[in-house]
Image (spheres, rainbow, N blue to C red):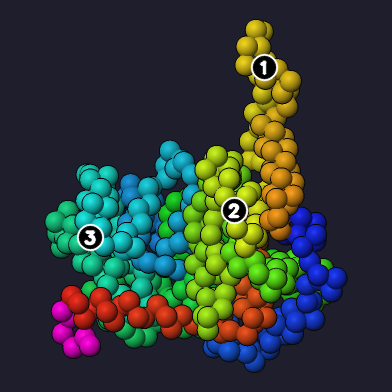
Amino acid sequence: MVKVDLSGAQPFFTAAGPDYKLAELAHKTLAEGSGLGADFTGWLGLPQRIKDTELDAIVAAAEKIRGRSQALVAIGIGGSYLGAKGAIELLKPRPGKNDPRVFFMGNTLSADALNDTIEALGDMDFDVNVISKSGTTLEPAVSFRIFRELLVKKYGDKADEHIFATTDARRGVLKSLADEAGWPCFVVPDDVGGRFSVLSAVGLLPMAVAGIDVRRVIDAAIKEFKALNVRSPENPAWQYAAARQHLYGKGYGVEILGCYEPSFRFMAEWWKQLYGESEGKDHKGIFPASVEFTADLHSMGQYIQQGPRMLMESIVRFTESRTAYPFPADEGNADGLNYLVGRDMSEICRVAADAVRDAHVSGGVPNIVIEFPKRDEEGFAAMVCFFELACAISGYMSQVNPFDQPGVEAYKKNMFRMLGKPGAV
């Protein structure tokens, strides 16, 4: 179960504290489907739906890819790649002996990044998973054309056997292409926005190819959403959502998400999209930023400690480390570190985290600690369910629609017009 520690934020609360009545109302609105964007709340039941429908086919497709290819090129942008990339970096930061490499493309228009990926692929056998609701978003569409051409050059008339599409169930450019060419198709659910879609085929197929046990992930997510449905201030999602909204009301407009595991970096990128795109509208919203501790303590640490006091800090911790490493002794003790002998590195890291929290709180930075059990499939599932639910509750508390993103279209219109797309205005 997820645990939220608000002791480092408590000194910055008013006497009334976080508004759990408002959190309760927001959760009720979400559960009843009576709020803004209710048509996009299908993620709440997504794990069970996936288990009952597509999960077996996702696992079978992943096993097919793993059995014949050394790499998968997953093509998508935003919610079509961040969750999967975050999961793979968190759970499989170093591919196992028999694990294909997963390359993520379609999230950039950089020629250098494109050529670097093609060079890294080299002569590997590879498959492509193109992920797009419509098939018309420029960045993934450009990448897909290029990698589809590479498949044709490598496999000739067998190229289509190496393409898997994750797209709309019934319509769209990509769906039409897939039906015409006979590519296996998985579904981007109509009632789930991209940033909430990691527990669908969008995230699960690349994760499974990388060697993550997605059945464990889904089973754990089903249990986690049930556990998080408790309607009381004991609910950690209420605690997090209400605390950050309370602090926002006091002028803390930037939230820094930190973790002491380097492998968490892309989960933080997923979190930034989830919260930034859900809450940043109507001239409202907490700005989501991230840091990697302890590395960033020697760069951003100065700003956090003594810069403008508009920052709040949320720190992700794991109760249990996956590995152990006792600190070694040195006979000469020239570095003066023998006082650490016998302590495990995970203990040293925990002490460092406690010291940082105390320093930042004393420096005027409210601190929320979010603790997950372990860096494994169950821990990942708990993280996704917790952050998604807390995000929706927090969005409703601030009276915005947490499930749309109208501002994202502005740059697309300009880009298509400036590139000379026919009919663009």
> Which residue is found at the position 71% from the left and 45% from the top?
359
Q: CA distance from mark 2 to mark 3?
A: 46 Å
Magenta stretch in the rendered image: 420-425
Q: Mark 3 packing: few (<14 Cα in 10 Å), some, or many (20+)?
A: many
Q: Earlier in the sequence, mark 2 or mark 3?
A: 3
Residue that numbered label 1 is attached to: 336
Q: Earlier in the sequence, mark 2 or mark 1?
A: 2
Q: CA distance from mark 2 to mark 1?
A: 33 Å
Residue 295 percent coordinates (x, y): 54, 40
Q: Mark 1 packing: few (<14 Cα in 10 Å), some, or many (20+)?
A: few
Residue that numbered label 2 is attached to: 307
Residue 261 percent coordinates (x, y): 58, 44
Tag 1: residue type? Gly
Drawn side of residue 243 relative to residue 290, left or right: right
Q: Main secondary structure of the magenta part?
A: loop
Which SS class for mark 1? loop
Residue 146 sits in quarter: bottom left
Question: From this viewpoint, which residue is outermost toward the right?
Answer: 15
> Which residue is found at the position 70% from the left and 30% from the top?
344
Q: Quadrant of the N terminus?
A: bottom right
